[in-house]
Amino acid sequence: MANPNPVVAHADDYVRIFDTTLRDGEQSPGCTMNVEEKIAIARQLERLNVDIIEAGFAASSPGDFESVRRIAETLTNPVVLSLSRTRDEDVDAALRAVEKAKHPGIHIFIATSDIHLKYKLAMTREDVLNAATVAVMRAKRHLDYVEFSCEDASRSEWEFMAKICSEVIRAGARIINLPDTTGHALPAELGEMFAFMREHVEGADQVIWSAHCHNDLGMAVANSLAAIRNGARQVECTINGIGERAGNTSMEEVVMALKTRKDLMGVRCGIETRQIYPASRLLAQIIGQPVPPNKPIVGDNAFAHEAGIHQDGVLKNKLTYEIMKPEDIGIPSNKLVLGKHSGRHAFINRLQELGVDPATIDVQKAFAAFKDLCDKKKIVYDDDILAIANEETRRIADTFELVDVTVSSSTRTEPRAEVTLRVGGQERSAEASGDGMVDACYKAIYKIAELSPTLERYSVKSITGGTDALGEVSCLVRDNGMTVAGQGAHSDIVMASALALVNALNRLKSRGPAASPRPSEGP
Ligand SMILES: [Zn+2]
């Protein structure tokens, strides 16, 4: 191994950013991603310069194993690790999945709270202590980078946790993570827990302490900062704060809090903050969950100043109301960038400025889509370009391809749609009527695809202003117990809707019935 511990060796004031968008984040409803999509996210995480990527839970399903393996092979800089329970099969699967990583790691967890021991594990404290130590020793025979988590730490008895942590450190764990799995803790309390553990665990000064917080009470970021103030030097987080229930610590929020309040926190992290906005947009498009406008850092309104008095102040001096600069987060200024006469070179340049690596997309197709859009609208904004690039990033081997949509509607007749799809090289058409043009169009697509999923959510967003703007449609469909999201962008809303549905149906097909639901478990 070239460098067994790139992440362990850092100065005392360095906070490691551990991203779990692809594991904890992906575990939340409607956030499932296929392998190609996960790789696109992983590449963006590498551009963000995160220290550690939790790529999945290898033992949970063959699909998860494959994504961890592919991500491990693809990335160069970060540690890539897999989550693992303490059982032998889990540890072995995790080790196999990260085998080819430049910097492989494993994240072993077991619950330590009495309520989990009694109702979930049916194990005694002695059993848990034993299972944890054995698992860490098993992993340690193959790699050095072993993280151990006390699941539900914030509701565990501190003395017992101190004992188990001392044991796993003796067995070779390098990172100890104390998660607030249920989002139950308050900042002062969680801070005290870290202080207690660092004082009472044997070998505490030889490991990195890590926080993993959930946002059930809206405290995830505050709790993570409290942990840092009490010696934690790793934060586990996700892009846009996605994750089980109310989500995880949001990476952009914790990173910008550290940066903006360095005066008070006195620590730093290695995140390339200009990649934050592209990362947020990429994830939102892939999972089809738009970022709420008032979301800190990355929401549409995060830097908008509507009130007259604010605007006046901001014009005179930005610092009157802005504590951060939008350009530091990589937010495009939305100025006119490219148009009809822009060449391929200018297009590629702009992509790079927006944080998109041209090597990761089909530039030929993206450029053609860009030219197409230039024909339809006069002004092409940065957000339009990001939408096109993201569209190319997530392309997978499609079962269905949209060929044509014809809709007719008037105030006197029922809307009708005729749709043609290419299915396995053959064109198939169907007609349907419905409550509106989109409804008619969807019914025709269902007929051709021979599927009858439930449409759980449908939303339209205009990416940039104007009636000729590129519209982005997100939909969530459910079939056979599986929920998938689909997105489509087009200057015509019916077309964007059709593209979104076809995208979702392709995902349903790409997952296949073999994709078993993973256990909703983990720190
Ligand atoms: Zn979690």
Image (cartoon, helix red, strand yellow):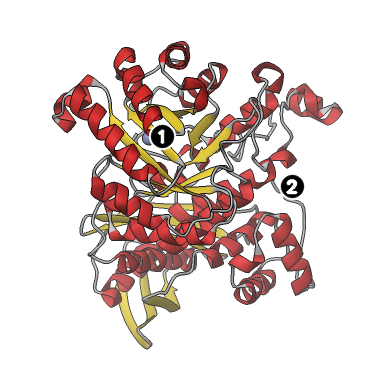
Depth check: 476 or 433 in front? 476
Depth check: 408 or 22 in front? 22
Query: What kind of element bears circle 1?
Result: loop
**Alpha carbon distance from label 2 to label 1:** 48 Å
Q: Give the image location of residue 139, x and y in percent.
A: 36, 44
| Residue located at (66% from left, 73% from top) | 367
| Residue located at (34% from left, 57% from top) | 65
Disc 1 target residue: 172
| Residue located at (34% from left, 49% from top) | 57
Which kind of residue does numbered mark 1 sit on? Gly
| Disc 2 versus disc 1: nearer the observer | 1
Report the side of 399 relative to 259 (left or right): left
| Residue located at (23% from left, 65% from top) | 513
Disc 2 target residue: 333
Report the side of 380 relative to 187 (left or right): right
Q: Which mark is residue 122?
A: none
Query: What kind of element bears circle 2?
Result: loop
Q: Residues within 10 Å of mark 1 (few under 14, many from 20)?
A: many
